[in-house]
Image: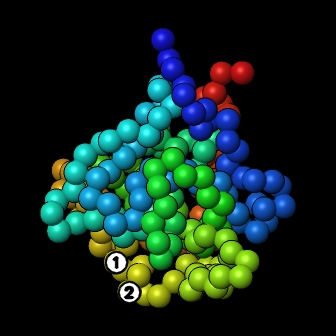
């Protein structure tokens, strides 16, 4: 018997149709920035559970999670990394602006990582407020993310190949595809 305590699958991928044009998505954070612990959604229970511990000198560089109501080729929801100065918490829902994606394969299966930034907060300026494309992200931040993803996956025993870094428009196609796959899989 499946138990679904939180019903993350009820949360739409896009807050509303207008937001799609603005590339704004709903993201659920699984693993917060600066954590050595990896958390992951357990869909059969509808909770985010402890998954494993990273090596002593490795931690998540930014908040990591998924876009609800999507399904990626690896059979998990589409992955998203939210570039944020301060970490959020596991299970946190955040509306974020997609700026691009890192196209990669893990053990030969497509496993893209979308890159997003938080929406601006009234009265508080964030360095990421003006980011609309992956090219707005400082190169050292992007290289740090790519390095982390490669090392983390290698430590887990997976073969990773980064094939490209793409802009926001291409990243949104990943979400569109993931939403279609989710709708086909989900029982009506």
Q: Residue at x 50, y 17 (%)?
A: 2
Residue annotated with mark 2 = 140
Q: Residue drawn at (58%, 71%), measured in percent from left and top?
A: 117
Could you tell me how many numbered marks the image carries? 2
Residue at point 73%, 77% (across, down): 122
Left or right, residue 15 beside residue 137:
right
Percent across and percent down for residue 128 are 58, 81
Q: Is residue 108 left or right of residue 57?
A: right
150 relative to 63 in the view: left or right:
left
The C terminus: image quadrant: top right
Mark 2: give few (<14), some (14-19) or many (20+) Cα within 10 Å.
Answer: few
Tags 1 and 2 touching, CB below 8 Å: yes
Query: Tag on residue 144?
Result: 1
Residue furthest to the left: 56
Question: Where does residue 18 sit, x and y in percent of width and height?
Answer: 84, 61
Residue extending furthest toward the front = 123
Q: Which residue ends up furthest to the top in the rendered image?
A: 1
Q: Dot 1: what SS? A: helix
Residue 157: x and y in percent read: 18, 50
Look at the numbered disc 2 and give the secondary structure of its residue.
helix
Residue 122 seen anywhere in this rendered image of the structure = yes
Residue depicted at x 41% and y 59%: 32
Which scheme is used to colour this image of the protein? rainbow
Residue 20 on image: x %, y %: 76, 60
Label at residue 83: none
Give the vertical position of 164 relative to 27 (above or below).
below
Q: Nearer the viewer, residue 138 or 42?
A: 42
Please say whether residue 181 is visible from this viewpoint.
Answer: no
Q: CA distance from mark 1 to mark 2?
A: 6 Å
């Amino acid at each position: 018997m499946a138990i679904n305590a939180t019903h993350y699958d009820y949360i739409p991928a896009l807050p509303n149709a207008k937001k799609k044009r603005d590339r704004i998505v709903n993201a659920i954070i699984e693993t917060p920035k600066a954590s050595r612990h990896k958390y992951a959604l357990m869909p059969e229970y509808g909770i985010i559970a402890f998954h494993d511990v990273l090596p002593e000198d490795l931690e998540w560089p930014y908040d990591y999670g998924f876009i609800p109501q999507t399904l990626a080729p690896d059979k998990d929801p589409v992955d998203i990394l939210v570039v944020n100065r301060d970490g959020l918490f596991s299970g946190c829902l955040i509306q974020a602006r997609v700026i691009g994606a890192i196209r990669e394969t893990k053990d030969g299966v497509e496993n893209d990582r979308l890159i997003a930034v938080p929406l601006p907060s009234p009265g508080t300026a964030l360095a990421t407020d003006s980011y609309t494309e992956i090219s707005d992200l400082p190169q050292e931040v992007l290289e740090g993310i790519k390095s982390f993803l490669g090392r983390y996956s290698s430590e887990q025993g997976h073969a990773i190949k980064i094939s490209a870094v793409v802009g926001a428009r291409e990243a949104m196609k990943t979400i569109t595809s993931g939403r279609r796959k989710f709708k086909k899989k989900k029982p009506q």
